[in-house]
Amino acid sequence: MQAKHTLITLYDYELSGNCYKVRLLLSMLNIEYTSQTVEFYPAQQHKTSWFKSINPLGTLPVLVDDDLTLKDSAAILVYLASRYDKSENWYPAGDAATLAKVTEWLAFADSITGSASQARLAEGFFYQLDAEACRASAHQLFRILDEHLWFAEQQNQPWLVSGAEPTIADIACFPYVILSEEGSIMRQDYPAIRRWTDRIKRIPGFTVMPGVFPAGPAQTT
Amino acid sequence: MSSTCTNLCDDLVILNQWHAIAAIEDTSSAPSHTRLLGEQLTYCIVDETVRVCRSDADTLPLPVTCAYGYIWTCLGTPLPLFELPEYLESDRTNVCAASIGVRVSAPRAVENFLDMGHFPYVHTGILGEQPHTEVREYDVEVTEDTNEVIATRCRFYQPQAAAGAEGGMLVEYVYRVPHPYCSVLYKSCPDDESRMDVIALFVQPMDEINVRAHALVSVIDKNSAPIAIRMFQQTIFGQDKPILENQLPKKLPLDPRAETPIRADKSAIVYRRWLSKQGIRYGVIPAAA
């Protein structure tokens, strides 16, 4: 796509929802990249001095594009969309209110990570965390998310932020919602969330990760 | 919503088994904690000695054996652990691939491991792919001398049979179930036609409906780094996890009429019968007498 451009490197762990956010957008934007595995569990390679020389925070994912190193999934999504999405749909920088709404949902996604993802780490990966408290917080967030999506649907708005096309807000919120059952956070009570996750699964370029299954083909009318 | 089962185990067959609790390489001198058969355990390695005890301080150390890359312990009087001679072959790469938590009973996890029918649907593009969904006729028996379930002549088309495989191949499998909660799989080795790769599943019953699934991968593969082998296995486990967690009832029903098997489930039928015959009650719903 870009002339004389070295390939993007993603420091990646397959079972990480935060890494999955980046893999999803890379795939949807059809951007080529190389993946460098960092074994988060059980080897904890993200805590090694080797990895901390790349990211002193010791967190995943990290994306390197030429001279730029980015260490946070939301920052990476903002960057990829701003730089590589010619349609400017994924990160609609032209409108102040829309941009602020996208940013609001990026913060909401971090809250989902701080609750639903933590419960998943406790149950599947044996982190010593208060899983019960994490589940309670996640349910509060899912209730808010479900209501928001239900009202949006009434306005024929399929995505988190009003507009015909999905934004990075949808990508940022999706992974730890769809993986929530691994932390014993069941989603039967959130039908609008269910419909929204199905819509995301039908975005061209959608990819799966372990624990996430593809949607059946959409009904054609 | 999360259900933890706190009943203590009074099933002597299960109490007297060795159970894997952690990879040796993941264990240090700092005490770690886990659960086995409803009991809280503490374990560590100090001066090259593995120590495992119940977490309520004043109890005696539990029996320990180190085998196949893992620490095993027993809450009863241990029977000998099953043999896995391939582990000692010098040209193999032995990798402790993962210890992943799954909300399911141990026998359900073992039964899923034995099932080839789910490969194209759950491990799409790796261990199977449509339209190659047929499970061909295979043989299952219980060996008289070692009392193990053995399934042989299992064949399945796999697009990427192992971390080091390039392109699809018709893979031959042999399954062993030498322990109520452990299974060993031998499969065609992409690198050497005369040998078999080994993947072993050691299921640690944290309680009746929660397990840690430990995997040992023992392969003849000069090209794949251990991390590639580990990530391959973690991907497979990660794909199985939601399937297992959605199985109900979580305990494995042993009544032959409880769940309707198809021909491909032959190994599951023999496995359930074998558990019944040993009188196992933990992690199962026993058949009515």
Image: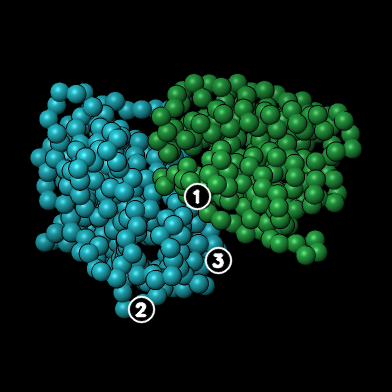
Chain colours: A green, B cyan
Above or below residue A89? Residue B160 is below
Instruction: Identify residue for label 3.
Output: B131
Q: Marks 3 and 2: in contact by CB < 8 Å?
A: no
**Looking at the image, which residue sits at the far right?**
A94
Q: Marks 1 and 2: in contact by CB < 8 Å?
A: no
User: Which part of the image, by quadrant, shows the N terminus of chain A?
Assistant: bottom right
What's under tag 2, amino acid-wise?
Answer: Glu
Image quadrant of residue A76?
top right
Instruction: Identify residue for label 2.
Output: B193
Residue B147 - label:
none
Instruction: Identify residue for label 1.
Output: A50
Instruction: Write the residue at 34% across / 35% down.
Output: B209
In space, the residues marked 2 and 3 are separated at their CA atoms by: 26 Å
Residues beneath discs 2 and 3 located on the same chain: yes
Callout 2: residue from which chain? B
What's under tag 1, amino acid-wise?
Answer: Trp
Image quadrant of residue B164?
bottom left
Instruction: Write the residue at 38% across / 49% down.
Output: B98
Residues beneath discs 3 and 1 located on the same chain: no
Q: Secondary structure at mark 1?
A: helix
Q: Is residue B15 visible?
A: no
